[in-house]
Amino acid sequence: MMLLVDAIGAAAAAPKLNNPCLDASKPYQKMKWCDATLPIDERVQDMISRMSLAEKIDALDTVEKSIDSLGLVPYNWWSEATHGISHVSNGDKTPYESNFAFPITTAMSFNRTLYASQGSSPSLADVKIDLPLTHASPAWHRWKKTGAQIGREARAFMNQGDAWSTYWAPVINLAREPRWGRNIETPGEDPYLSGEYATQFVSGFEVSEDDPSGLQASACCKHYVANSMDHSTVAGETFDRTTFNANITMQDLVDSYLLPFQARLPLPLHPAPSKRATPAPARCPCTLPRTCSPSCSPPTRHAPRGAPSPAGTLLGASP
């Protein structure tokens, strides 16, 4: 019984992330991929050259086994951060994670004073509608600050080995089907609004003002594309998002459903407010013509998994 308890305790204590480059007793520290002064492409190439074929194939799945050739523990690409991080472990240093308002609530208020106030109750005369949306709008920066706080918390959990580094967020599908139970996860029904929400959320989530040279945490906009149905039974026939065929006209696809995702693509990662952070690839679509599968997971992370990163200095050494 004691052995069973010890085994369970050891499993529970296993870190979600580790950094072999910090362990001087192991050989990894002297490998190229652990040298943060080298170009990222050179470090990634060094990692790949050391991996076995079996490790490379396994790394294409959503849930990866350990990569023993690099000293890396098992990894799961699937974590959530739409209104706070999930799929995390709680410990003495990470006892709780925050839970923020759903995006549909944040996006629909357009209340200039609500976004700008710091705990004070506004008078009716102070309430102004935050339209049109501009880079100077308080609502714009509130969305960014929400993403920044969630991303910072993700980094803190990651630094303790209590979270993975890749997050499916934000949800930028359009809320145009009232029966879809996940409308509250979206910014709303407007393509422009959803795209601007994604731009600011991801910028805050991935780029820390304290350490703009590194990636704070990795955001992945979802679900590409036109996903508004997860599971439904109609007239005795059951559909789910992996088999349902969404018949969409080219006009609706171009004018509506693709726009929020296109808003996230044009510019590279950059700390300046006028630039847009480039997120991880959009999550695999959950409606045909492309269906969800493990192969839709991005093949590599922004930086070598477990390797030293400038963002690791944000709240302590990255594991």
Image (cartoon, rainbow, N blue to C red):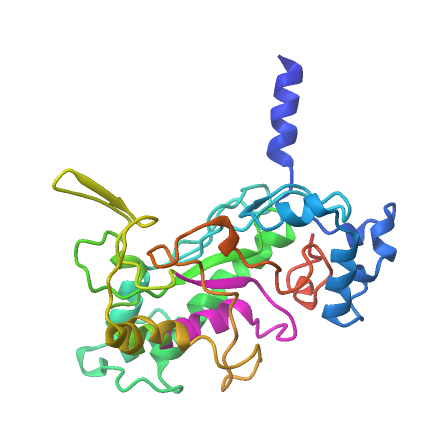
In screen coordinates, is 304 left or right of 156? right
Is the residue 179 above or below the residue 58 in the image? below
Residue 78 located left or right of residue 182? right
Nearer to us in this view, 89 or 304: 304
Magenta residues (range)? 196-222
Query: Is residue 117 at least partly visible in the picture?
Result: no
* Residue at x 36% of width, y 55% of height: 286
Give how far across and how far down residue 207 sits, in percent.
Answer: 56, 72
Magenta stretch contains residue 220: yes
Is residue 285 on the magenta stretch? no
Residue 157 on image: x %, y %: 58, 52
From the viewer's perspective, is residue 247 above or below residue 51? below
- For image coordinates 47% across by 62% down, the residue present is 220
State which quarter of the image contains the N terminus.
top right
Q: Please indicate, yes or no, whether residue 236 appears anywhere in the rendered image.
A: yes
Judged left or right of residue 132, residue 269 is: right
| Between 269 and 251, the one nearer to me in the picture | 251
Residue for point 18% across, 78% down: 124
Q: Position of residue 229 (x, y in %)?
A: 26, 53
Instruction: Where is residue 6? Give x, y as percent.
Output: 66, 22
The vertical placement of 120 against 97, above or below, is: below
Q: Residue furthest top?
A: 1
